[in-house]
Image (spheres, rainbow, N blue to C red):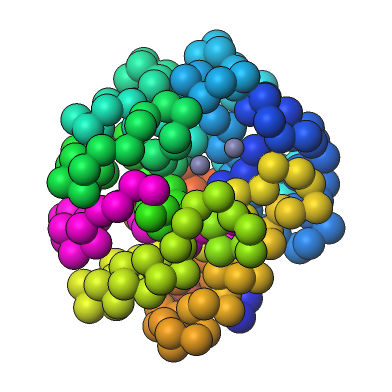
Amino acid sequence: MNDILDLHTHTIASGHAYSTLSEMIRAASAKGLTLYGCSDHAPTMPGSTHNFHFINFKVIPRNIHGVHVIMGSELNILDFDGNVDLPVSTLKRLDYTIASLHIPCLSPGTKEENTRAYVKVMENPYVTIIGHPDDSRFPIDYQVFAKAAKEHHKLVEVNNTSLTPGSARAGARENYGILLNYCRDYQIPIVLSSDAHFETDVANHRYAWELLESLDFPEELIVNTSVEKLKPYIPVLNDMFGEPAGDSCCKGE
Ligand SMILES: [Zn+2]
Ligand SMILES: [Zn+2]
């Protein structure tokens, strides 16, 4: 399957990742990606960068080494009301965001509390993707989660790092098995992500693809195969890639 993008990646700005933005994009180029998204951890993650890091992305070209580049952040969900750790004034400037639960930023609650954290963060219009909702350390009600993702028009991530043997996120394979059945039933698009913290891992979606193939998950719900599928979620892509071929250009000429 033609996998052309990776939107969950980290650079040295995250504090526990080890490649520069330039190195990550060069790796994306070498792997033939069309679109690379950078999503460094927002400031509450210990060792990550300051809010100011996220307000100056305008200096970064939109096309580097032949790869289209969008800039966002992986936000930390701070509480069971779904608050996140960048101000709206910053969120407005980002191309997209991922919202995730992380142990250093929020201690797991009850199943009801964890589910509420996700549902409330999905009400945030600046959240694009829900990151790695696969961790048994944060048990959730997957049916409630899926219904909220559908209602609030959020992409659900299938995170390759969670599925990699030895991952700290427990039970990811089983949890995705449950969640992806709901995504299929409710027609919720998903995005495969590497969660790369080093350049060699950019676009590594190996375990995620293996899982989707084993579940015979429908390709039309996987946004990685086409920028067109992603445009409804990330408005800047309409400017970067223009209208779909055949819809706008040269008709009748
Ligand atoms: Zn990280
Ligand atoms: Zn994360």
Q: Residue at x 16, y 58 (%)?
A: 144
Residue drawn at the location 47% of the way across and 57% of the way down = 170
Count of residue discs = 0
Instruction: Please state if 12 lies on the left or on the right of 14 as rendered.
Output: right
Instruction: Looking at the picture, tell me which residue is in the foreground, 134 or 53.
Output: 134
Vertical order, 224 against 76 (above or below):
below
| Ligand 1: quadrant of the figure | top right
The residue range painted magenta reads 137-161
* 45 versus 193 height, above or below: above
Q: Quadrant of residue 23 in the image? A: top right
| Residue found at x 59% / y 55% | 167
**Image location of residue 120, percent across then percent down:** 19, 38
**144 lies left or right of 83:** left
Query: Taking 45 as reference, is 185 left or right?
Result: left
Position of the N terminus by quadrant: bottom right
Percent coordinates x, y for residue 88 in the rendering: 33, 20
Q: Position of residue 212 (x, y in %)?
A: 49, 78
Which image quadrant is residue 98 in?
A: top left
Within the magenta stretch, is there residue 60?
no
Q: Is residue 66 above or below residue 223?
A: above
Query: Residue drawn at (21%, 49%), measured in percent from left and top?
Result: 111
The residue closer to the viewer here, 168 or 76, is: 168
Q: Is residue 138 magenta?
A: yes
| Left or right of 33 on screen, residue 245 | left
Q: Is residue 238 visible?
A: no
Q: Is there any visible trace of residue 128 in the rendered image?
A: yes
Q: Position of residue 125 (x, y in %)?
A: 26, 37
Foreground: 138 or 58? Answer: 138
